[in-house]
Image: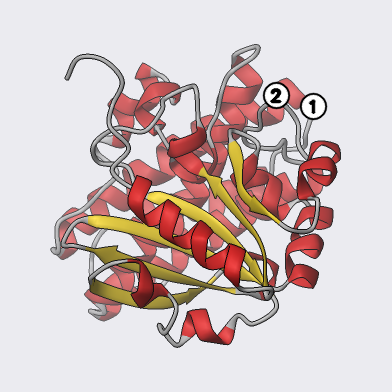
């Protein structure tokens, strides 16, 4: 597509802002995410992410207000930052709008705690502002954010958490609880693997632009990690879960050792040895030592 991409959400934003202007309960509407970014901007697959700051959040959660902005095809609610909830809507079949709905107190708290910055620092735009947030936001936001560093205490806890759940997942496999094991291997352990991949890239590459929440992983993780991670996910099959679990362990261990060495953190050798021996034991269907 040549030229500047058409804003697929222009009509929805216009309707939301018109509603806000006529309803004193709405204090701010702030666009975040790809629609406001300069680096890796919105494309035809992008959604519209909004902070809705309002003194009457329940009307947004009931669906009464979101239904005013277009034909709702899908809609649900999930927890979000600041102790609030998020209304997620698909309009007209494929236009997804995520509305993080917070009271002024919740939004201010999320700013002060730094939670909001993780979502706003790569780009935000005030679409409606009744409380003067334009003058308040700069002190909370930097030019750009990425993944924060990890303290020695957090590093030790994360590594031990990972090794503990290596053993936990394999016990589930040995017991025949394949679903539980696979969810641990390909969900919980992968979240910890992502954290260590983030820290490794920050440690190894000066000025690395590491995105939060695994965004654009293929752009920043590095070819070595991308090569190894291909073997870290499993089919719904015990033998393949065993293989993926061991591959995940090996990649995480390599990355964690790098982080420990470069930052001068103590590496939990005994914990790693315990997990490795358990995973590498003969697949006899019994626990090691029995």
- Furthest residue in direction front, as rendered: 22
Q: Is residue 10 visible?
A: yes
- In terms of depth relative to the viewer, which is nearer, 120 or 68? 68
Residue 110 appears at what percent x and percent y? 75, 60
Question: In the picture, which quadrant includes the C terminus?
Answer: bottom left
Give how far apart the Cα atoms at labels 2 and 1 are: 5 Å
- In terms of depth relative to the viewer, which is nearer, 71 or 41? 71
Mark sitting on residue 264: 1
Q: Is residue 288 visible?
A: no
Q: Are marks 2 and 1 in contact (CB under 8 Å)?
A: yes
Which residue is drawn at the image coordinates 78% and 43% (left, top)?
137
Question: For mark 2, does the 10 Å Cα neighbourhood hold few (<14), some (14 to 19), or many (20 or more) residues?
Answer: few
- Determine whether the residue tagged by mark 1 lies in a helix, strand or loop: loop
Question: Looking at the rendering, which quadrant does residue 142 occupy?
Answer: top right
Which residue is drawn at the image coordinates 32% and 30% (left, top)?
228
Mark sitting on residue 261: 2
- Determine whether the residue tagged by mark 2 lies in a helix, strand or loop: helix
Question: Looking at the rendering, which quadrant does residue 12 occupy?
Answer: bottom left
Question: For mark 1, does the 10 Å Cα neighbourhood hold few (<14), some (14 to 19), or many (20 or more) residues?
Answer: few
Residue 97 appears at what percent x and percent y? 37, 58
């Amino acid at each position: 597509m040549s030229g500047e991409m058409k804003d697929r959400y222009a009509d929805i934003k216009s309707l939301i802002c018109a509603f806000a202007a006529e309803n004193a309960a709405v204090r701010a509407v702030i666009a975040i995410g790809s629609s406001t970014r300069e680096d890796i901007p919105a494309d035809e697959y992008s959604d519209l992410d909004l902070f809705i700051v309002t003194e009457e959040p329940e009307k947004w959660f009931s669906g009464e207000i979101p239904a005013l902005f277009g034909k709702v095809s899908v809609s649900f609610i999930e927890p979000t930052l600041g102790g609030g909830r998020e209304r997620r809507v698909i309009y007209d079949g494929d236009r997804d709008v995520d509305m993080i709905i917070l009271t002024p107190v919740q939004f201010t708290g999320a700013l002060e705690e730094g939670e909001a910055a993780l979502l706003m620092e790569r780009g935000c735009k005030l679409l409606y502002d009744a409380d003067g947030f334009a003058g308040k936001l700069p002190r909370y936001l930097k030019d750009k954010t990425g993944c924060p560093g990890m303290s020695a205490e957090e590093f030790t806890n994360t590594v031990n958490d990972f090794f503990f759940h290596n053993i936990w997942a394999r016990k589930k496999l040995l017991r025949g609880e394949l679903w539980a094991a696979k969810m641990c291997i390909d969900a919980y352990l992968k979240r910890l693997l992502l954290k260590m991949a983030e820290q490794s890239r920050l440690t190894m590459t000066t000025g690395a632009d590491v995105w939060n929440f695994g965004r654009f992983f293929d752009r920043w993780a590095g070819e070595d990690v991308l090569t190894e991670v291909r073997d870290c996910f499993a089919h719904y099959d015990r033998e393949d879960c065993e293989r993926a679990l061991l591959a995940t362990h090996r990649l995480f261990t390599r990355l964690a050792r790098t982080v420990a060495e470069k930052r001068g953190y103590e590496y939990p050798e005994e914990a790693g040895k315990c997990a490795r021996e358990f995973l590498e034991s003969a697949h006899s269907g019994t626990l090691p030592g029995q």
